[in-house]
Amino acid sequence: MIDTTTIHDGMVEIPAGKIELRDDRTKQQWMVEIQAFWLAKFPVTQDLYVSIVKENPSTFKGNELPVESVTWKDAALFCNLLSANTGLTPCYLFQEQQEEIGFNASASGFRLPTEAEWEYACKAGTTAIRYGQLNAIAWYKANSENSTHSVGQKEPNSWGLYDMLGNVWEWCTDIYDENVYGSYRIFRGGGWFDEERSVMATNRRRSHPLKFSIDDLGFRIARNK
C-alpha cells in the first residue's frame, strides 16, 4: 500500500470560493460555488503513474515528465487504483462492457478536478487569463522544442500549483455537453504543442473519454477536503 502521507504532501489545499465560467461556443456564462478541496501541485508524472498502473503509455519517456497519451478513462482508472492503494474509497464506478461511468462526488478517494475547480485553482484569486507571463509559467509551442518537460520547472501560481498552463492539457471530471456531444469530457490548460492563444485559464476543449488520447494530454489529481 502506498503511503497516503507522501501523496498528500504533494497536494495543495484550495480554499472555498466561486468562479464564473464561459463557453465561447454557446456564449453562455454561469457561476459555480467551489468547496475547499485538495489539488496536486503537479500533473501526474510517469514515475507515479507506472508505480500504480505498471505500464507507461507516454510518447515522451521520463520519470519526471507528465504522463500523456492517456484517455479520460485511463485517468479515472488511475484515480481509483491510487485510492485503493491508499485505503480510500474510489470515486469512479465502472460498469462492465458499458461506456457509462458513474461518479461518487462524496467519496474519500482521488479524482479528477471538475472544470470549475480547475479554472478556479489555475487563476488562484486573479481574474486574468493567465497567472503570469507565459514564458515564465508554461511550456508551449514557442519554447517547448516539441516535447513535454519535467514538471515543476516553470513558475507556480500564487497558490503553489505548477504547470497549470502548458506542458500537457489536463482531463477534468465533467461531461462537456451531453445533449450535443454525448459522453465527451472536458480538458483544460493547453499543452506543449499549442500556440499562445490556446494556453489560457479559460480555454475549454473536449473529446471522447474512452477513445481519445494524444501526446500533449495528461491529468492531475484532486481530492475532497
Image (cartoon, rainbow, N blue to C red):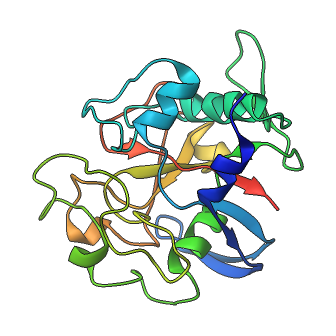
Q: Return the residue found at the far right.
A: 106
Q: Position of residue 207 (x, y in %)?
A: 47, 40
When asked about the image quadrant of residue 135, the answer is bottom left
- Is 33 placed left or right of 42 in the picture? right
Task: Judge whether 156 appears above or below 110 on screen.
Answer: below
Residue shown at 47%/70% (left/top)?
Answer: 24
Q: Position of residue 216 (x, y in %)?
A: 31, 44
Q: How many marks?
A: 0
In this view, the residue in front, 140 or 26, is 140
Residue shown at 36%/51% (left/top)?
Answer: 168
- Is 145 placed left or right of 194 in the picture? left
Task: Judge whether 89 appears above or below 117 on screen.
Answer: above
Image quadrant containing the C terminus = bottom right
In this view, the residue in front, 162 or 208, is 162
- On the question of residue 54 being in view, the answer is yes
- On the question of residue 114 being in view, the answer is no
Q: Return the residue found at the far top.
A: 97
- Is 135 placed left or right of 145 in the picture? right
Residue shown at 33%/35% (left/top)?
Answer: 214
Image quadrant containing the N terminus = top right
In this view, the residue in front, 24 or 4, is 4
Residue shown at 26%/71% (left/top)?
Answer: 197
Task: Judge whether 121 appears above or below 46 on screen.
Answer: below
